[in-house]
Amino acid sequence: MRLFRLPQSPIPSPTSLLATAVMLAILTSCAGPAPQRPDITPDQEEQLQQESTIETLLQQARRGSPADAPRLTLDAVDLMIATDAPDRARQTLAAMRVETLTPELRIRHTLTSAALMLSAGDPSEALGLLQPAALAETAPFPQTQVRALELRAQAFQQDGQYLAALRERIQLSPLVRDSAPNENLNGIWEILSIAPDSAFTGANIDSYELRGWLELRRLINSNTASIQNQMSALVQWRNSWNRHPAATRLPDALAVLDQIWDNRPAEIALVLPMQEPLGQAISEGFLSAYYDELARGQEVPKVRIYDTSFRSDVLVLYDQAVDDGVDMIIGPLLKDAVRRMQRSSRPMPVPTLALNYGDPGGGTPEGLYQFGLAPEDEIRQAADTAWAAGHRNAVVLTPAGEDYVRIQDTFSNYWSELGGRVLSVDTFSGSDYSPTIKHMLAIDQSETRAARIRNLIPRNTIQFTPRRREDVDFIFLLANPAEGRQIKPTLSFHFAGDLPVYAMPAIHDAGANPVANRDLNGVIFSDAPWILNDQDPLKASATDTWAPASGPVKRLRAMGVDSYRLLLRLEQMRRFPYTRVQGATGLLSLKEDGGIQRELENAVITDGIASVLPR
């Protein structure tokens, strides 16, 4: 089966079918022939239907009885929020006369206002409306009380107050036990999945249910490398916590593990350039993870290797793997091949984890996932870390050359989106970093002013101390260790030794002598857990098996480890996007476009050694 001779078109989703059915029902109930709109997609049809429903509700509110009008208007506003029409929702709410509403509708007006604030990404304002006093007013109205607790949980979660969000969900559990138990269980597990460990460190765990949830989280996270181990951990947990609500009904993201295991691939293909350095390093990591599971008695799929070394037509071997009947494919590695796969208008013939990224917005065929060491993840993390530290004004320093423009632009654009300012973008080449740093910090301007003064007042007694610009909060740096070991002291020489430096992973080579790295002291950077710590039990055996390697090769080996461990996770991540997998390259999650996003660990160099910072 060839890549461009794929199976039939994808089956429409239930939502699209429902929207189509509703539209057909409306059309067939009207007199005359039904108009044909071949240019309208199912999503557009659904949107048109929702807009029509909003108009109908507002018309009914205007024409109906005064007693029904507020309820109908609030129904319309809820639909406006759901269909991403916040301005109209805000105007409609503001036009309502709150003082004329019944107690129940007045509370509902408050909750709808809070929901509008959440949709605008303002959880603190929403929480201001959802105070305990307002919550107490919902007691006579069970459905309203449920919505209030749900909104408070969503607001705390959006605000990063994960423990508070979890407590709200636990309080909600008995109220929805008969109506929507799984929705709330899934909400609890979503909080536990996305929250960092620090969210629960030192917390007052004051209930059986909360203790049980946190223990379940610990067991699942400590066995993330193996679905089999997680399934065994679930059995152990249910036996120990048999009175816990989740013991009888697991969250869907955990209940699906049995189904994923039952449908696991029997045979997979590794499509890689095995004789080229990149492919070799990735395959070493992949095989380390594979043989480790085999040695521990775990069930593993059969692996076929398709060597694409020194070939440009790698999709020929991809198609060969499909024809050979494999159930899943890992690869290819070439970016151009991934771009061609993106352009397919049909699903992939088998689930495919490409080991590179295509073009943003280049298409996401069903069954295509993309995974690599994308610099965008590293750039975003550096920016987020600097922003969280309170910095707002950045300067960017990278090597010169077209290859680095993408790094500069990505950081500058993302930093601007956060609300920060990029004061300058500078580049270096060669081994003399002083002119670049003087320009970056406007020291050369200070020297020019001094020279002008000396020309005007030619006195040998004039003393001058150069001054750097004072509006810079930090430097975003891309440099290798050798470059960084010269740049950092040069910054100190030019009165900027106290300026924070946030660097990309390239600044750190785990194999370097700590004495040599002391010139990098104070640099903050992010890197793969595989590089920064020894917590992964596979790392020691992989290090013993393969030849000593530099930092870049180690990162590629970690990518190979994760490419194997993601095999059975992709379906779970697709169905439950909040799923996080602690991988060798970082904390992994799935984006809407099928790309795997990495959250790395932050570290600071102290006495020449990288020390991991808490999340």
Image (cartoon, rainbow, N blue to C red):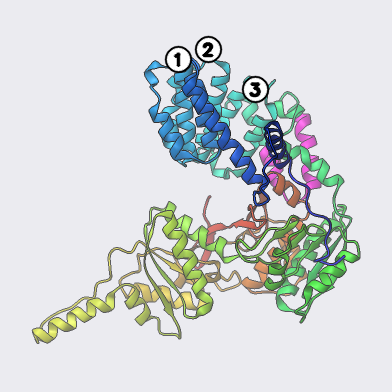
Q: Select label 3 or label 1 by which is in front.
A: 1
Q: Are marks 3 and 1 in contact (CB under 8 Å)?
A: no
| Local SS, label 1 | helix
- What kind of secondary structure does the magenta stretch mostly adopt? helix
Q: Position of residue 378 (x, y in %)?
A: 55, 62
Say which amino acid is labelled 3.
Val
User: In the drawing, what numbered circle is on residue 218?
Assistant: none
**Residue at image point 57% right, 23% down:** 146
On screen, residue 609 above or below 174: below
Q: Position of residue 186 (x, y in %)?
A: 67, 35
Q: Select label 1 or label 2 by which is in front.
A: 1
Q: How much space separates mark 1 and mark 2, taking CA atoms?
A: 10 Å
**Residue at image point 67% right, 72% down:** 553
Q: Which quadrant holds residue 217?
A: top right
Is residue 318 in view from this perspective?
Answer: yes
The magenta span reads 217-240
Q: Which residue is mark 3?
A: 176
Q: How much space separates mark 3 and mark 1, taking CA atoms?
A: 23 Å
User: In the drawing, what numbered circle is on residue 103?
Assistant: 1
Q: Is residue 65 found left or right of 273 in the rendered image?
A: left
Q: Which residue is mark 2?
A: 140
Q: Are marks 1 and 2 in contact (CB under 8 Å)?
A: yes
Say which amino acid is labelled 2.
Pro
